[in-house]
């Protein structure tokens, strides 16, 4: 079993829809949780960063962490075609520790 | 800043040949990472360096893979001999750890390797 599980999709939704992306993990020691966005033929780039449990909002994006369930989510409101990309969750045990564990990534397409 | 620079962007080679991938991290960053990405396995960490010193190479698949960082502005990942199963996109990333670190790793554009 992988430490971090993420449904690879693909996921296709119409423009304007609310998108929910999720990851589950098995290591309860994870404390820091990230979402990276990767456009086609590009490297991943950090989108959201959260510590421990709770919510964090940035514009149309909301990241949620539920440590009791070992479950994290990324919500995208009013989705746009420009949001079409692969979204990877990542997590680490210690802040500043560089060994991130990535999910497999979910490929998302927003249809105009 | 130009970001993380990788070369070549594409590499096609035949089985058994030596392949060298190159990376220039963001100036001032003290960590450098090499990842491999495939559809089946996702993004896997191969090795990472801190201040040019290899810290963890447990992700290097086998002895055919080696990585070096001779100075703060250059690193190589070498595969010798290459095999078709090495076909993947190889990413280099760099980061800077400080008091307010958010574990942000900055990725390069990747090298798409095809071994025939």
Image: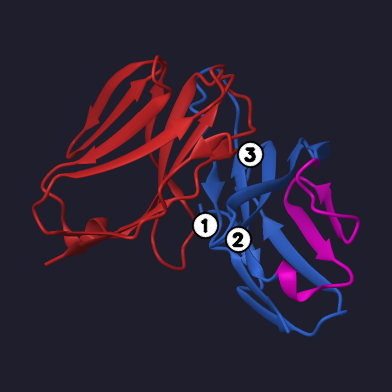
Chain colours: A red, B blue
Nearer the observer, A7 or A14: A7
Residue at label 2? B5
Q: Is residue A84 above or below residue A57?
A: below
The numbered mark, 3 or 2, whose residue comes first in the sequence reads 2
Circle 1: element type:
loop
Q: Are marks 2 and 1 in contact (CB under 8 Å)?
A: yes
Confirm whether the magenta stretch covers residue B73. Answer: yes
Q: Disc 1 to disc 3, how far (Cα)?
A: 13 Å
Give residue A79's position: percent from left, percent from top.
15, 51
Q: Disc 3 to disc 2, how far (Cα)?
A: 13 Å
Q: Is residue A75 above or below residue A14?
A: above
Give residue A86's position: percent from left, percent from top.
38, 56
Residue at label 1? B2
Residue B52 picture quarter: top right
Give residue A68's position: percent from left, percent from top.
40, 14
Q: Are marks 3 and 2 on the same chain?
A: yes
Nearer the observer, A80 or A67: A67
Circle 2: element type:
strand
Residue at label 3? B29
Circle 3: element type:
loop
Chain letter for mark 2 = B
Confirm whether the magenta stretch covers residue B67. Answer: yes
Task: Look at 88% across and 79% down and name the residue there.
Answer: B16
Circle 3 packing at 10 Å, graded few (<14), some (14-19), many (20+), is: some
Task: Look at 53% across and 46% down and name the residue there.
Answer: B106
The numbered mark, 1 or 3, whose residue comes first in the sequence reads 1
Write the start and end of the magenta stretch as one range: B57-86
């Amino acid at each position: 079993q992988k430490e971090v599980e993420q449904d690879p999709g693909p996921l296709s939704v119409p423009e304007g829809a609310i998108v929910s992306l999720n990851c589950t993990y098995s290591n309860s020691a994870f404390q820091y949780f990230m979402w990276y966005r990767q456009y086609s033929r590009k490297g991943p780039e950090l989108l959201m960063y959260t510590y421990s449990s709770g919510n964090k909002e940035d514009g149309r994006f909301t990241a949620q962490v539920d440590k009791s369930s070992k479950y994290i989510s990324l919500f995208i409101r009013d989705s746009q075609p420009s949001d079409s990309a692969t979204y990877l969750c990542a997590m680490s045990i210690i802040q500043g520790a560089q060994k991130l564990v990535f999910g497999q990534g979910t490929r998302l397409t927003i249809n105009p | 800043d130009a970001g993380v620079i990788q070369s070549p962007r594409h590499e096609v080679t035949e089985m058994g040949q030596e392949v060298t991938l190159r990376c220039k991290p963001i100036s001032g960053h003290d960590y450098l990472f090499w990842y491999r990405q495939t559809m089946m396995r996702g993004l896997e960490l191969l090795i990472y360096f801190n201040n040019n010193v290899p810290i963890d190479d447990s992700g290097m698949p086998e002895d055919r893979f080696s990585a070096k960082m001779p100075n703060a502005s250059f690193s190589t990942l070498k595969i010798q001999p290459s095999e078709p199963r090495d076909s993947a996109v190889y990413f280099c990333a760099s980061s800077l750890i400080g008091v307010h670190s958010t574990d942000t790793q900055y990725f390069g554009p990747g090298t798409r390797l095809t071994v025939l």
